[in-house]
Amino acid sequence: MTLLRPRLRRIPLNAGAVVTVVVCLFPVYWMITTAFKPSQDIQSADPQLIPYTWTLDHFRRAVQADGFEQFWRDSILPTLTLVYFMITLPFTIVVLRGFIATTPPELEEAAQVDGCTKTGGRQGRQGDPGDRQGHRGRQPAPRY
């Protein structure tokens, strides 16, 4: 009986997940099947979930249209760039996180003593770090 209760509690969650997946994937399914339907079926007042006849005419007309090569280049380059960043960005984050995680706490403490905050900014800093006038409001020692 104790194993049955957690399973019963998960039924609404799983049903909600199934509904969400169907709602998200149905437009993709509809788009793909519409691409292969004949024009008469697309424009009919009675839509069909599963097309009875399949055709490649829409693809032939698109490829033979004027400017297809330019449209193809304009859409494929941004897609490839997006795919490149989707692949390399997580890898970069993992590598940099490993590097940041190895920073010794003593180094962070020393930076805080020097006036840095946890986010890396300096408190009360004005001007160039080498400028003694602007460094934390101290005046340089007079020279005799």
Image (tube, helix red, strand yellow):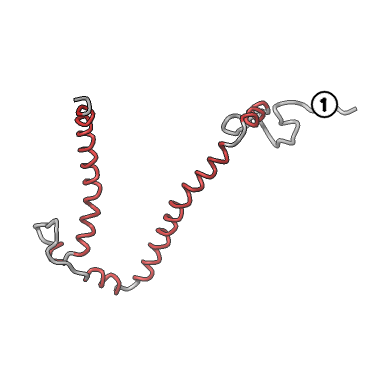
Quadrant for the C terminus in the image: top right
Q: Is residue 98 above or below residue 126?
A: below
Residue displayed at 74% across by 35% down: 131
Quarter assignment of residue 136: top right
Is 86 situated above or below 52? above
In terms of secondary structure, where does tag 1 sit?
loop
Position of residue 140 measured from the top left corner of the image (x, y, whole percent) = 79, 28
Residue visible at 44% across and 52% down? 87
Task: Out of 135 and 118, give the one closest to the viewer.
Answer: 118
- Residue 103 location in percent, x, y? 60, 35
What's under tag 1, amino acid-wise?
A: Ala
Between 142 and 83, the residue placed more toward the observer is 83
Residue 125 left/right relative to 20: right
Residue at image point 46% right, 47% down: 90
Q: Which residue lies most toward the right here?
A: 144
Near mark 1 (Cα within 10 A), the count class, few <14, some 14-19 or many ≥20, is: few
Q: Residue at x 9, y 57 (%)?
A: 46
Q: Looking at the picture, how far across and down is residue 93, in whole percent?
A: 50, 44
Dot 1 corresponds to which residue?
A: 141
**Which residue is nearer to you in this view: 12 or 134?**
12
On-image quarter of the N terminus: top left
Instruction: Note whether 116 is above or below 84 in the view shown.
Output: above
Q: Is residue 89 left or right of residue 40?
A: right
